[in-house]
Amino acid sequence: QITLKESGPTVVKPTQTLTLTCTFSGFSLSSSGAAVGWIRQPPGKALEWLALIYWDDDKRYSPSLKGRLTITKDTSKNQVVFTMTNVDPVDTATYYCARGSVSTNHAMDVWGQGTTVTVSS
Amino acid sequence: QSVLTQPPSASGTPGQRVTISCSGGSSNIGGNYVQWYQQLPGTAPKLLIYRNNQRPSGVPDRFSGSKSGTSASLAISGLRSEDEADYYCAAWDDSLSVVFGGGTKLTVL
């Protein structure tokens, strides 16, 4: 069974750095073609794709947020870490991590339950 | 403003067939595969369709996807009350990112 779970702070102050961890099981991010991505959803709004990391450590970022985002992986711990710098109240959202795959052309086939982050002073 | 354009709402009665459209451009839908996700109230999104028209294991064949040019569609036949949800299209974009639609809220009357 494949599972992913997001963890991190529920409240972050403006201008601070948000760090979220995705801990997964049931697959290996060292397997060829595997990927893990981050997607967020502000309250009552649409999904927004943020970042993706591949098994070979290649990374992709949302062009509109690229300078603020970093995604890394720790294959030995089955974790992917996502950071967003200089957060603002507009970054308040539910953040999801999800498994992707080159074989499904980047479709995210298993999602975590999401973690809600509020940016407020 | 989402890159892919979806109607904000759609509706149908039980048993009906409904379609949801998704419009993009040559850099995303026009040259790449389309995915569809279902998000039931208060839950995480679930993959419904990938590679334009492929269903993951466990997704009923009432759900089908198609693509033509720079547009795609999700069709739901034999509409059920449990299909009431938000539906999102997505596609890889040549900017090396994934783009989503704004979502369509489906109401089963």
Image (cartoon, coloured by chain):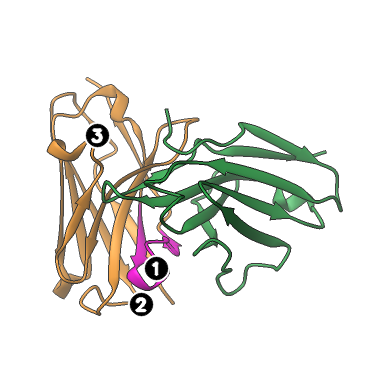
Chain colours: A orange, B green
Three-letter amino acid code of the residue under disc 3: Ser
Which mark identifies residue B63? Answer: none
Three-letter amino acid code of the residue under disc 2: Gly
Verify CB contact (< 8 Å) between mark 2 and mark 1. yes
Q: Look at mark 1 in the image and give the residue it sits on.
A: A3
First along the sequence among labels 3 and 2: 2
Three-letter amino acid code of the residue under disc 1: Thr
Q: CA–CA distance between discs 3 and 2?
A: 32 Å
x and y percentages locating residue B45 in the rendered image: 50, 52
**B105 or A74: nearer the viewer:** B105
x and y percentages locating residue A98 in the rendered image: 37, 59
Question: Farthest residue in the top direction?
Answer: A121
Q: Look at mark 3 in the image and give the residue it sits on.
A: A64
Q: Look at mark 2 in the image and give the residue it sits on.
A: A26
Q: Chain of mark 3?
A: A
In the image, residue A13 above or below residue B21: above
Q: Residue at x 71, y 51 (%)?
A: B83
